Amino acid sequence: MQPTAIFLIGAASSGKSTIGKLIATEYHFAYLDKDIICNKFTGLLLESKGYSPHERDGNTFYSDTIMPLEYQTLLDLANDNLQLGRSVVLDAPFLGYFSNKDYIRELKEKYDWHHVRPLVLQVDVDFDTLKERMKARGLERDEWKFAHWDAFVEGIRARRCLWEDIEIRHFDNSPAEVDKNRLHNTLSFKKTTTSL
């Protein structure tokens, strides 16, 4: 089967990790979470410049210098798997790249992904649920979001994924329990294991 790169996008606390791990388990895809891959290094880099290790939102050193390195690392790891014929789930917001219509075309050219099927799965959630989930996870890096909630929400609404040359599918993850059948229907992949 043609290897697939699922770009799993959505707001922080939308449930991307839960959805991504479920997809990876059910379809035997590699699961690559940018935070797990990069957070320790990111924190040290921020501290080396005098910032809190959690200071990302509104930090230009993070957005201009560290974030591109995080995504480069994530995509290099994804490419290694894809070149071996293994499909991947990329769990990262990608918000900073939404406005680049040619982003996927550029990745295909850079990594020679002529044999790879890229797919966006956008995990959506209503904002009340999003806030409750964010409070429940209790991460320091979310403090800026709570302090500037209206601006945070407006930023999410304003950033639409404008990528071309890729199919974009949506999955509403607002309910407390993931509807596995609905997720399976959204993806419509063939499986060799039990159904979602």
Image (tube, rainbow, N blue to C red):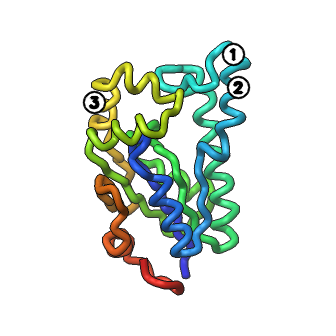
Residue 49 image label: 1
Q: Nearer the viewer, residue 87 or 35?
A: 35
Q: Quadrant of the C terminus?
A: bottom left
Residue shown at the point (27%, 37%) measured from the top left: 157
Neighbor class of circle 1 (other Cα within 10 Å; few <14, some 14-19, many 20+) is: few
Question: What amino acid does circle 2 point to?
Answer: Leu
Q: Nearer the viewer, residue 25 or 129?
A: 129
Kindly state the secondary structure of the residue where label 3 is placed: helix
Q: Are marks 1 and 2 in contact (CB under 8 Å)?
A: yes
Task: Give residue 142's position: percent from left, percent from top.
Answer: 47, 29
Looking at the image, residue 184 lies above or below residue 37: below
Q: Which residue is mark 3?
A: 154
Question: What amino acid does circle 1 point to?
Answer: Lys
Looking at the image, residue 24 lies above or below residue 146: below
**Marks 1 and 2, how far apart at CA:** 7 Å
61 with respect to 183 (left or right): right
Q: Nearer the viewer, residue 53 or 30?
A: 53
147 with respect to 66 (left or right): left
Task: Give residue 118's position: percent from left, percent from top.
Answer: 48, 63
Residue 69 image label: none
Residue 50 visible (yes or no):
yes
Neighbor class of circle 3 (other Cα within 10 Å; few <14, some 14-19, many 20+) is: few
Q: Which residue is mark 2?
A: 45
